[in-house]
Image (cartoon, rainbow, N blue to C red):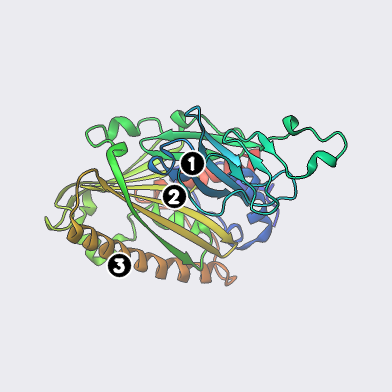
C-alpha cells in the first residue's frame, strides 16, 4: 500500500470517507505513524502530584523511548531520557519520591536531577573521559490542569493544542482533583480503531444501553477545534452515581481523552502495542477532599461496563478490517464529525511527516 497516494488527501466533511482498512492493518502504516504522529505530538505521561517536590519522578515511554519525568532541585520539571549514556541501563524502573540523584541500575553511573553526569565508577582510567561533557537528553515537557505532557520532538505549543478547554470547564478546575487509581485494558485492535469508536455517539444507542439512558442523544453535539474535539451531552443519572449535569468528552490529538462527568475526571491514553493491539490506561481523579468510597466503586463498575462494551465492538471491527472484505465507507456528517476531524489530522500528519 502506498502511503503517498490520494488516500492521504484532505476531504470535506460532507463528502468524507473513512480511512481505508489498510491503515489499520498494515505494518508500513504503523511504522510511519511512530515518527509522524507519536514522536512529534504531546503525550500524557504523568499527573502533577507524582512530581510535586524535588526528586519526585515518574517513568514513562513515548514511541519506544523510555523517559523519566523528574522535578529538579531548582523546581524545574524535566523529561529526561531514562537511558544511561554508558551502556543504556535504566535510571529508574518505577515512580519514586525525593531522590537526591539518578543512579543507573546497571553500572552505577550517577546523574544530577537535571541530567548532568555526576560520577562514573572507575572511569578515571579512561583516557580523555570528561564527566562534564555527558548529560541525559531531554524531551519537551509541560504541565496543564494538574496533568503532565511530554513530546520527543518539537510539538505545537501545548496552550495552542488545548486552547478553549479552560474556558469551557472554568467552574470545575481539574487541577483541584486528586488522583485515585489506574485501570488498564489491553485490546485486540489498532489504536485508531479505538479512537474512532470514542469519537462518535452514533453507536451509543446500539452498544451502550445503560449509558444511552443517561445521555440525551438528541442533544448530543460535537465541537471541533484545531487540535482537539469535544463531545457534549446533558447527563441525568442517579445521585449515587453522577447526578445531573454535563457530560464532556474531550479528545486531544493524537491519543488522549478527558472524560469529565459531575464529580469525576477520567483521563485515557491509547498506547499502540502492535498494528492490531493497543492498551488504554484509565486514570481516575476526584475533587480534593471528597472521600466517598461507595461513589468511587459505582463509578469504576459503570465505567468498566461501558469499556467492556467498547472493547467487544472494537475487536469485532478490527477483525473485519483485516478480513479483506471492507472497503472504506462514507462518514455521517452529523454524527461522525469527530471521526472526520481525527482522520484529517492523521492524514495531514502522514502527508507532512508530523
- The percent position of residue 72, horizontal first and vertical second, equals 51, 33
Crowdedness of circle 2 by 10 Å Cα count: few (<14), some, many (20+)? many
Q: Which residue is mark 3?
A: 305
User: Residue 53: x, y in percent?
Assistant: 42, 36
Observer-nearest residue: 334 or 28? 28
- How many numbered marks are there? 3
* CB contact under 8 Å: marks 1 and 2: no
The residue drawn where x is 67% and y is 48% is 108
Left or right: 150 as drawn, with respect to 244: right
Horizontal side of residue 128 vs 216, given as left or right: right
Q: Is 110 in front, or is 70?
A: 110
Residue at the limit of the structure toward the top, as seen here:
74
Q: Nearer the viewer, residue 80 or 241?
A: 80
Query: Which marked residue is nearer to the observer: mark 2 or mark 3?
Result: 3
Kindly identify which residue carries mark 1: 12
Q: Residue at x 17, y 57 (%)?
A: 241
Which residue is painted at 69% across and 39% down in the image?
Answer: 119
Left or right relative to 221: residue 257: right
Q: Secondary structure at mark 1?
A: loop
Q: Earlier in the sequence, mark 3 or mark 1?
A: 1
Give the residue at mark 2: 339
Closer to the N terminus: mark 1 or mark 2?
A: 1
Give residue 85's position: percent from left, percent from top: 72, 43
Amino acid at each position: 500500500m502506498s502511503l503517498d497516494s490520494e488516500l492521504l488527501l484532505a476531504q470535506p466533511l460532507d463528502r468524507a470517507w473513512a480511512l481505508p482498512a489498510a491503515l489499520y492493518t498494515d505494518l508500513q502504516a504503523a511504522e510511519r505513524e511512530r515518527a509522524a504522529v507519536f514522536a512529534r505530538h504531546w503525550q500524557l505521561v504523568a499527573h502533577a502530584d507524582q512530581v510535586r517536590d524535588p526528586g519526585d519522578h515518574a517513568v514513562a515511554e513515548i514511541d519506544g523511548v523510555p523517559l523519566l519525568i523528574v522535578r529538579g532541585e531548582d523546581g524545574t520539571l524535566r523529561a529526561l531520557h531514562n537511558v544511561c549514556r554508558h551502556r543504556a541501563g535504566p535510571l529508574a524502573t518505577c515512580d519514586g519520591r525525593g531522590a537526591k540523584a539518578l543512579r543507573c541500575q546497571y553500572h552505577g553511573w550517577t546523574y544530577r536531577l537535571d541530567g548532568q553526569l555526576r560520577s562514573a565508577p572507575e572511569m578515571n582510567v579512561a583516557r580523555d573521559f570528561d564527566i562534564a561533557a555527558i548529560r541525559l537528553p531531554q524531551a519537551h515537557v509541560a504541565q496543564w490542569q494538574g496533568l503532565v505532557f511530554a513530546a520527543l520532538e518539537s510539538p505545537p505549543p501545548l496552550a495552542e493544542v488545548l486552547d478553549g478547554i479552560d474556558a469551557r470547564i472554568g467552574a470545575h478546575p481539574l487541577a483541584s482533583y486528586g488522583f485515585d487509581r489506574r485501570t488498564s485494558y489491553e485490546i485486540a485492535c489498532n489504536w485508531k480503531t479505538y479512537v474512532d469508536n470514542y469519537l462518535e455517539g452514533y453507536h451509543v444507542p446500539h452498544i451502550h444501553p445503560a449509558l444511552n439512558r443517561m445521555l440525551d442523544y438528541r442533544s448530543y453535539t460535537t465541537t471541533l477545534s484545531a487540535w482537539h474535539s469535544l463531545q457534549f451531552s446533558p447527563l441525568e443519572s442517579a445521585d449515587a452515581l453522577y447526578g445531573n449535569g454535563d457530560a464532556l468528552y474531550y479528545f486531544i490529538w493524537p491519543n488522549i481523552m478527558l472524560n469529565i462527568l459531575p464529580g469525576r475526571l477520567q483521563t485515557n491514553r491509547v498506547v499502540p502495542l502492535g498494528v492490531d493491539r493497543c492498551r488504554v490506561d484509565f486514570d481516575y481523579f476526584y475533587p480534593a477532599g471528597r472521600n466517598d468510597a461507595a461513589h468511587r466503586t459505582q463509578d469504576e463498575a459503570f465505567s468498566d461496563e461501558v469499556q467492556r462494551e467498547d472493547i467487544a465492538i472494537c475487536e469485532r471491527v478490527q477483525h473485519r478490517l483485516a478480513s479483506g472484505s471492507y472497503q472504506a465507507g462514507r462518514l455521517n456528517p452529523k454524527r461522525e464529525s469527530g471521526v472526520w476531524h481525527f482522520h484529517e489530522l492523521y492524514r495531514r500528519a502522514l502527508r507532512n511527516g508530523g
